[in-house]
Amino acid sequence: MNDALLILMRWLHISSVVVLIGGVIYGRLVLAPALAPLADQARKETWDRIAAAFRGWIMAAVAGLLASGLYNLLQKTNPPAGYHMVFGIKMLLALHVFAVGFLLGKPGVEEAKRTRWMTGILFSGLAVIAISAYLRWMSR
Ligand code: HEM
């Protein structure tokens, strides 16, 4: 039973990462250049619709990450030396991703700002994934 829950929570964690970080990277690297040729007003309206459609998924992914991440953490009964320090760095970057992620779900944001925010999540998100791979290696 515990194993099944562990696998389920791991699935929830990875799936939430895919939705949040994958969605933002798609926005920054694919949608932004694809929408660039549109007229200013049409582009603004399209980004507002994208933000409104993505908003619920951002909330769901953050909730999924918090619940599954906390569960994963509580399963680490005997973490190696240095684990909590690296985990703390991961949390700081994850908080940045969450905070900017919430902002991204808002309509009416200036376009240059939205692009900067997506770039920020792209780098922080990939850094968090790299740190998580290291955490996994530490506790192997
Ligand atoms: C931007 C947010 C986050 C991203 C991108 C992220 C990404 C990841 C990834 C890719 C893994 C490796 C999954 C695996 O190999 O099973 C992982 C593991 C983990 N995550 Fe997260 N995570 C995020 C937020 C959180 C939060 C908020 C928590 C805690 C509240 C958390 C706690 C953990 C723990 C404890 C592990 C297991 C590490 C280990 O194997 O020792 N994560 N995370």
Image: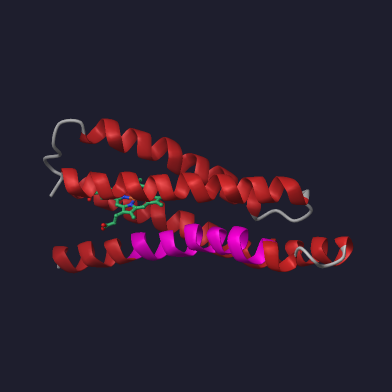
- Whether residue 83 is in magenta: the answer is no
Indicate the quadrant where residue 63 lies.
Answer: bottom left
Q: Is residue 109 visible?
A: no
Q: In the drawing, does residue 30 fall left or right of residue 40?
A: left
Viewer-closest of 35 and 71:
35
Left or right of 108 on screen, residue 63: left
What is the x, y in percent for residue 4?
19, 69
Q: Which residue: 61% across, 62% down? A: 27
- In the image, residue 51 lies at what x, y percent? 68, 61
Residue sitting at 46 percent across and 49 percent down? 125
Boundaries of the magenta span: 12-32
Q: Against 117, is 49 above or below? A: below
- Residue at (60% x, 51% y) in the render: 118
Image coloring type: secondary structure
What is the x, y in percent for residue 111? 76, 51
Q: How many marks?
A: 0
